[in-house]
Amino acid sequence: MEMILNFPCLCILLTMFSAIISSALNRRWARYLNTFVVTLVGILSAAVLMFTLTSGKSYVYQMGHFPAPFGNEIRFGSLEAGMALFFSVIMLLSLNGGREKIRMEIDPGKEKLYYIMINLLLSSLLALVYTNDIFTAYVFVEINTISACGMIVITEHGRTIEAATRYMIMSLLGSGLFLIGICILYDMTGHLLMEYLYTSISNIMAAGTYRIPMMVAIALIVVGLAIKSALFPFHAWLPDAYGYSTVSSAAMLSSLVSKGYIFLLIKLIYRVIGFEVFFGSRIINVLFVFGLAGMIMGSVSAIRENDIRRMISYSSVAQIGYIYMGFGLGTGAGMVASAFHILSHGATKSLLFVAAVGLTDASGGHKEFDELTGAAYRNRLAGAAFLVGALSMVGIPLFSGFISKLLFAQAAVQSQGKALAALVVLAMSTVLNAIYFMKTVIRIYTPTDKKYEVTAFGYKVSYAITLGCFILLNLLLGLFSQPITNWITQGLTILQ
Amino acid sequence: MNHILLFPIVFPILAGIMLLTVMKYQNRKPLLAYVGTVLGVNALWGLFAMFRVSEGVTVFYLTKSLPIYLKVDTVGRLFASLMVLVWLLGGLFSFEYMKHEKNEQRFYGFYLILCGVLFGLDFSGNLITLYLFYEFMTLTALPLVLHTQTKEAVMAGLKYLFYSFAGAYMALFGVFFIGRYAKTLEFTPGGVIDPSVFRENETLFFVVAMLMILGFSVKAGMFPMHAWLTAAHPAAPGPASAVLSGIIVKGGILALIRVVYEIIGVDFLRGSWVQQWWMILSLLTVFLGSLLAFREPVLKKRLAYSTVSQLSYILFGLSLFEVQAMTGSLLHIIAHVFIKVALFFTAAAIIYMTGCKRVEELRGVAKGMPVTMWCYTIVSLGLIGIPPTSGFISKWYLAEGALHTGIPVFSWLGPVILLLSALLTAGYLLPLSMRGFFPGEGYDAGRFAGKEPPLSMRVPLLIFAGLTLGIGLFPNVFTNILSAAADFLM
Amino acid sequence: MGGNLVQNYGEVVAMVLFGIGFTNLLLQKNMIKKIIGLNIMDTAVYLFLAEKGYITGHIAPIIKNGDFSPDTYINPVPSGLVLTGIVVSVSVTALMLSLTIRLYRRYHTLDLDEISTRLKKEGR
């Protein structure tokens, strides 16, 4: 069993080295290697998850020779392992679903680079999930940003380059704030490892000195991560980046990259800042307000959009708003709801992106709604998958979206003073969601006489299997949510 | 053993999904045979199961505190029996009617799925199960509204969807609050909330109750959320508008009974502003619906407005929190199902045979379709409330109940408005009969000659007309059971 | 208050620089100026870290004559952080510059807003 303790570190190293090795391979072998590594990471993470779930503890793994408080550490409990498993599963599915598109849209000479980016992305995500050192977190945040940028820009298209540039600028602003926040924290506490930071911060807060600088530092970190995960007013780059990059990239950007930052934030809240300090501060009110604004504005923009991919992207803005609203509620239940929503939105949004590409391809590559009329009949499986995703987003019972709404609402009811605002906005946003998703569903199920050239893409077996897995994942989250919420609750408790 | 309750829910849903995805029928006959068999088997099994099983069945747990739980009681049996009857006869009727519509297979697929969902709604034993099937009812009824896929139908469908979702989320809002304070969400006559807890948070609970009443009554077309109904019901193909207006809207009523009587509890609400507003809104709807129906020239739309009005009779009866009025409401549910389905069948038969949609085009229609128009006339009299039809009995109970409550103003205002509305009902339903039978001078006699619909359309009409009369003639059979049920809920 | 500012002039300068860099990155239209802003911002952070790690009178942490006493050397951790940070910022800058080159080749302008409006006009 001691073996399993090495797995998280092994996963990070595996993905990093496979990125390096890929550069020496041809594109076919790079693809094989990537699939193999992502699968392996999934399996290893599953093993770690089983192990941590049965033991119910979290483990510290020392990196290098220096013991704490100087050295670097990895720390993992059940929540981290589960997230790693989830990330690798979604990554595998997104890649499989968009494989044909990757072949079609990316210059063959660059396909290898794409897989290098993917490997790097996974390694940085894993590092964000597992690391116990705040500066390491910063470094991997930047690696994450760079590889995400590479994934956007790899399709040669004016829009993607512009979107990638905007994405980089926003991200750099965010990571600048995050970095300076870390430095101020380091200045005040003298530590970079999370446990030691936690003790120092609670000492400082208890003593009452330096309360304001501490709050400033925390605010900088939180705002930095919020900017990076495209919280409402900072989302300008998002529709272009998700809408015009290749479909696997879009699916991964929305369900992995931004979620990686959010998970880091959850970890920082519990392990560094401390639950009480964070929820006692006014930062959560700011997050709450921006979250609510995002829930409404994202949906409103989505309604006005005439391009299916961009519509789904705007819906992401709304969903990120949900997550920050959950943080803003200031209760443990809110955090559980947000953590569950990371999973539910990750599973649903990547499903929607992958299904949407099947629909657009069955409509001669057009993404406008007029052309998508009847697309669900031309590619039945993609239509069904889109339907499942849409129902989940709208929050119909039995699908994953309903459970997250339920958890958010339950959390909201328990919180003081914010219940009404949260519930009203939740209801409004749900109805708005219903408007644009059901409109699309009706549109794609309206028969038309117009003939389109049917591409072989929609009928590939791997694409069908991917969609099937996505649908199953969604139903799984919707039907058997209790063990999952139990796991999240337990994971959050031992996160500290 | 108790799990046989699941069969009538799961079987038609699976059969419907099969029909939508896997099966490909080239000819009508095998398709109709398939649909008929599924409906028949399901009806028998459903009736058997619901009268056999009276314990609850927990299917599975959505979350730890939210089980999907099925339990059959008198109200559930009432709604389910009505649904089965309408579904069978509606199916029979549609076999002929759907000849002139496209995409039959899709229609029947959703028709079957909806049957299963409605069984689920009627059997649900707690609030979250009810909500689940309620949402699915909204969604699976949508394709029926959209069926013709004209621009009008799509707009009506969207309107229907948004009103329904808005309503459902107002209700869900309440579910969350109640979920926090209640010990259980299982339906219990008298409510699930502790009186002391209720008194502490009185205002909150009143707001929640009002929201849930407003939310669920969207389905029942209560003012101010009634606009979708008059758009959606006429847009659907004939048999579909009949089941929408007859059964689906009753889903809202069932949900209201469950929430008000078995979750919140009437003792808390009696005399509160919630009750007052509910009464005001339902009376307003009774009157407005009739008035609008009176002015409407298109037959199906007129019938839809009539549904709006008649459903609020039921809602008014429910809002009085009184046994007799409640009995009246339950009786009016039965009466309205039979009558409204028959009325929509008439409208569908007329459209199917002649293509006429507006009332003024139908002068002399009874000369060609006497059986149809006789049925129409009988059920119209029932809806107006002329003895010896079912409508008379139910309205009598409603008015008696209202007078009996002794609530100031409403105890006499209610019956007055019911009476006024009955006059308006006569005003909008009977002209068609009168003009139909006595067209007067100068109409085209040959236009309707020999347009009597085929047997499979006439039989359902005759059955419903007969039932309308039957209840009026032998009311005691029903009133005894229903007043016992009403008594149980108080 | 004023005394504090004078005493900690290094940190003050770092914060002012950070602000300048941040606003430049955020508000400048010209891509190159944005990148310069980015670099100013990063440099400010390094200055801040270096200032924090430096202890007056101590020397760089290179062991001389077997002297292991912590009183001789400055804190080495911030220096390590600065080095790591520099690596990150160099790679980010390189990426930004390469993006800028691509944009310039396509649109012959360095103004991001103009590119956006042009893209919208193209309508694709």
Image (cartoon, rainbow, N blue to C red):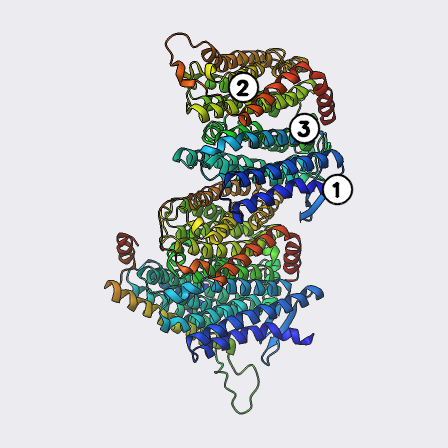
Which chain's residue wears label 3?
B
**Could you say whether the residue bearing mark 1 is in a helix, strand or loop?**
helix
Q: Nearer the viewer, mark 2 or mark 3?
A: 3
**Residue B483 image point, x, y percent:** 72, 21
At label 1, the amino acid type is Asn
Crowding around mark 1 (Cα neighbors within 10 Å: few <14, some 14 to 19, many 20+) is: some
Q: Residue furthest left?
A: C108
Residue under numbered circle 1: B2
| Alpha carbon separation for disc pair 2 and 3 | 24 Å
Which sits in the foreground, B293 or A110? B293
* Earlier-in-chain disc, 2 versus 1: 1
* Earlier-in-chain disc, 2 versus 3: 3
Q: Residue furthest top?
A: B441
**Could you say whether the residue bearing mark 3 is in a helix, strand or loop?**
helix
* Earlier-in-chain disc, 1 versus 3: 1
Which sits in the foreground, B131 or A161? B131
- Residue at image point 54% right, 73% down: A12
Residue under numbered circle 3: B78
Residue under numbered circle 2: B286
- Residue at image point 49% right, 38% down: B104
Mark 2–mark 1 CB contact (< 8 Å) = no
Q: Classify residue B395 by image quadrant.
A: top right
The image quadrant where one finds the N terminus of chain B is top right
